């Protein structure tokens, strides 16, 4: 069961960190951030005010898409 407002995690980092580069803080007030390492490279996933962003670009939710073009 999903909690309606899950607690924000301090930070989540996946994958190895280069030794010559310091780790950056991912935590900000009211923002969840995750770094996902995929076959296509690393992606920054953020959730701000209930909206998702990938690499800084806002992701359109299915609810927003349906509001614009309702199913027949």
Image: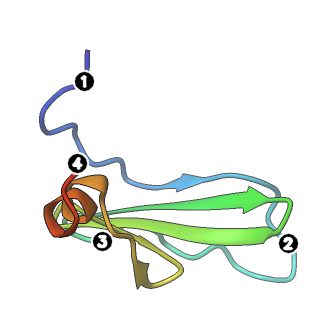
Sequence order check, earlier mark of 4 and 2: 2
Question: Of helix, strand and loop, which one carries label 1?
Answer: loop
Question: Of helix, strand and loop, which one carries label 3?
Answer: loop
Marks 3 & 2, CB-CB < 8 Å contact: no
Which residue is label 2 attached to?
A: 18
Which residue is label 3 attached to?
A: 28
User: Distance of mark 4 from mark 2, alpha carbons?
Assistant: 51 Å
Residue drawn at the location 35% of the way across and 47% of the way down: 9
User: Distance of mark 3 from mark 1, alpha carbons?
Assistant: 23 Å
Sequence order check, earlier mark of 3 and 2: 2
What label sits on residue 72 in the rendered view?
4
* Residue at the farthest front position: 72
What label sits on residue 66 in the rendered view?
none
User: Distance of mark 2 from mark 1, alpha carbons?
Assistant: 35 Å
Instruction: In this rendered view, identify the residue nearer to me: 10 or 32.
Output: 32
Which residue is label 1 attached to?
A: 2
Residue 54 shown left or right of residue 27 in the figure: right
């Amino acid at each position: 069961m999903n909690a309606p407002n899950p607690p924000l995690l301090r930070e989540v980092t996946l994958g190895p960190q280069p030794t010559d580069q310091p780790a950056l803080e991912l935590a900000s007030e009211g923002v969840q951030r995750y770094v996902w390492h995929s076959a296509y490279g690393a992606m920054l996933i953020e959730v701000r005010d209930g909206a998702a962003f990938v690499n800084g670009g806002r992701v359109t939710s299915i609810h927003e898409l349906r509001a614009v073009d309702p199913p027949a």
